[in-house]
Image: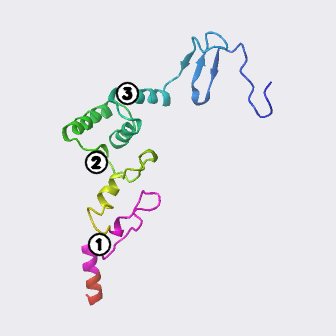
Amino acid sequence: MPGPGQPSPPEPTSPGIVIVFGISITFSALCTLEGATLNRLDGALARIHCFLRLQRALGWTIRDLDRVLTAVGDNAIDGLFLVRLMYVKQLLDKFGLPLDELLSWWANIETTVYPQDEEQRSLYERLFLSNAVLNPVDDAFVLDERQTELATIGPDERTHPHDRRRARDQRRGS
């Protein structure tokens, strides 16, 4: 007997159980998964299945394939994405660039660092927040707390030549 607030178990005579998201399981015998069939695997599970098969075939990490899918595939694994993926793979092999750098040709430059890669820096940090590139680092390139937008957005006469000229002209009264 289930306790208060707990769902009742399925009826023992039920040949199938419908689970959340419309997926159903048809059992050939009760109380065993042997011979059970998952039905209606379209949608999310079919997409996961395609994604994992592709990930294993490429030998890439799940995160790297997700980054490529987001950058060039409009989040859909279809024929167009597979053609684009082929081009990405060819360019990776030809030029030997890091994946995040190559993907910046199609999508925004990555600004986030994943928890498992905390010792690494995002491509944005390597390009714009590096003392090797600009010493000292310009405050105009510092990101907000979420690491998604510039912390200061707007003209800054110290960093933009056009704005310096306009500020100078305003001071002169022109």
Residue at screen point 41% across, 46% down: 117
The crowding category of the residue bearing disc 3, from other C-alpha atoms within 10 Å (few below 14, some 14 to 19, many at least 20), is few
Q: Relative to residue 13, is residue 162 drawn left or right?
A: left
- Considering every residue shown, the one lying at the far left of the view is 94
Of helix, strand and loop, which mostly describes the magenta segment? Answer: loop
Residue 82 lies, with reference to residue 32, above or below; the image says below
Q: Position of residue 44 (x, y in %)?
A: 49, 31
Extreme residue toward the front, this view: 119
Q: CA distance from mark 3 to mark 1?
A: 46 Å
Q: Which of 142 and 5 lies nearest the eye of the viewer? A: 142
**Range of magenta residues:** 138-166
Which of the two marks, 2 or 1, is nearer to us in this view?
2
**Left or right: where does residue 23 sit relative to residue 79?**
right
Instruction: Report helix, strand or loop for mark 2.
Output: helix
Circle 2: is it few (<14), some (14-19), or many (20+) Cα within 10 Å? some
Viewer-nearest residue: 90 or 129: 129
Secondary structure beneath disc 3?
helix
Residue 56 - label: 3
Instruction: Name which of mark 3 and mark 1 comes first in the sequence.
Output: 3
**Please, what is the three-letter code of the amino acid marked with disc 1?**
Thr
The residue indicated by pointer 1 is 159
Q: How many numbered tags mark residues here?
A: 3
Residue at 29 percent of width and 57 percent of height: 127
- Label 2 sits on what residue type? Glu
Q: Is residue 161 magenta?
A: yes
